[in-house]
Structure formats: structure tokens, C-alpha cells
Image (tube, helix red, strand yellow):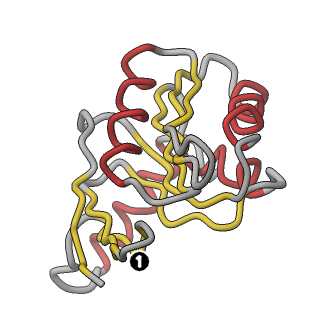
Amino acid sequence: MEIKIVEIEKPEDVNFILGQSHFIKTVEDIHETLIESVPGIKFGVGFCEASGPRLVRFSGNNDELIKLAKDNALRIGAGHSFIVFIRNAFPINLLPRIKAVPEVCRIFCATANPTQVIIGETNQGRAILGVVDGASPLGTEGPEEIEQRKKFLRDIGYKL
């Protein structure tokens, strides 16, 4: 097995969700789930088909995000993996609904951070072994950072 690292290529302000599913129906079901979850969401979905013609299947409602999804899915190239790029919504609002899609097996990450996908490649194909999401911590928060965290969550409306 050869281990490779694939950098997720995206604009800084775009969030994405990377996961694994088990059926070509994933593309349409995730599309429907996203549209129903957050009014005004913009997104692109890419799905790596693992058998048959083995194409990157895609959907979405924003050309830029669809292109990001297709390009990144093709570079990852792991069978039955999917990637969703989003604007006008946050993963926290989508994860419960995406996890409830019958074809979805797991979520590897949901982030806007710089991300590396660790790939294992064999003579059969590729698998996602894990992800590096952002950078390592530089220490632990103190009283000032705790207050900043709490204020931030209230400022953006996630806490009262």
C-alpha cells in the first residue's frame, strides 16, 4: 500500500463535508437533503462511484461549488467517498440531516480549515484513511479565551 496526501483545494470562506456512502443514489439524496435543510444554501456535491463506469457523479445549485466538488472528488479518488462544498450555511446545520441519509456510512470531517486527506492506495483502488483538519493546538485556553469563545458563540447566534 502506498500512502498519499491530497490537499483539499477551495476558497478560504467555503465549508465542506467529506464522507463515505455506499450507493450511487447518494448524489440525489444529499442534494435533496441540502435544499430542504437551509433556505438559500449554495452547494456542490461530488461522489466517487466505486464500480461500473467508476465516474465522479455530481449535483448542486452553484457552478463554482459543483466544479470544486468534481475536481476534489476526482483528486481524492476513493470509492464511494463524497464531498460537499457549501456557502450560505454551516456544517453544524447540515450534519444531522446528512448523517440521516440512508446511504451515508460515515463523515470524515466538516470544516472550512485547510485540510489534507490521507489516502491509502492499493492495486484495487483508494481509501480515505483519515484527515488532517487545520493545525495542531498551541496550548490551552485561559480565562480570556474562554470568555472570547462564549462571546463569539452568542454573537453568531448559536447560544443565548
Q: Is residue 62 placed above or below 119 in the rendered structure?
A: above
- The image quadrant of residue 3 is bottom left
- The image quadrant of residue 61 is top right
Q: Secondary structure at mark 1?
A: strand
Query: Could you say where residue 30 lies in the image, as x and y percent from the top left?
Result: 70, 38
Residue under circle 1?
Answer: 129
Of residues 119 and 158, the one nearer the viewer is 119
Crowd band around label 1 with a 10 angstrom C-alpha radius: few (<14), some (14–19), many (20+): some
Query: Could you say where residue 136 lies in the image, as x and y percent from the top left?
Result: 21, 78
Q: Is residue 153 placed above or below 29 in the rendered structure?
A: below
Q: Is residue 117 placed above or below 1 in the rendered structure?
A: above
Q: Residue at x 77, y 37 (%)?
A: 29
Left or right of residue 150, residue 144 in this image = left
Q: Residue at x 62, y 46 (%)?
A: 52
Q: Is residue 55 placed above or below 125 in the rendered structure?
A: above
- The image quadrant of residue 140 is bottom left
Q: Residue at x 37, y 18 (%)?
A: 64
Q: Residue furthest left?
A: 138
Of residues 1 and 154, the one nearer the viewer is 1
Of residues 111 and 125, the one nearer the viewer is 125
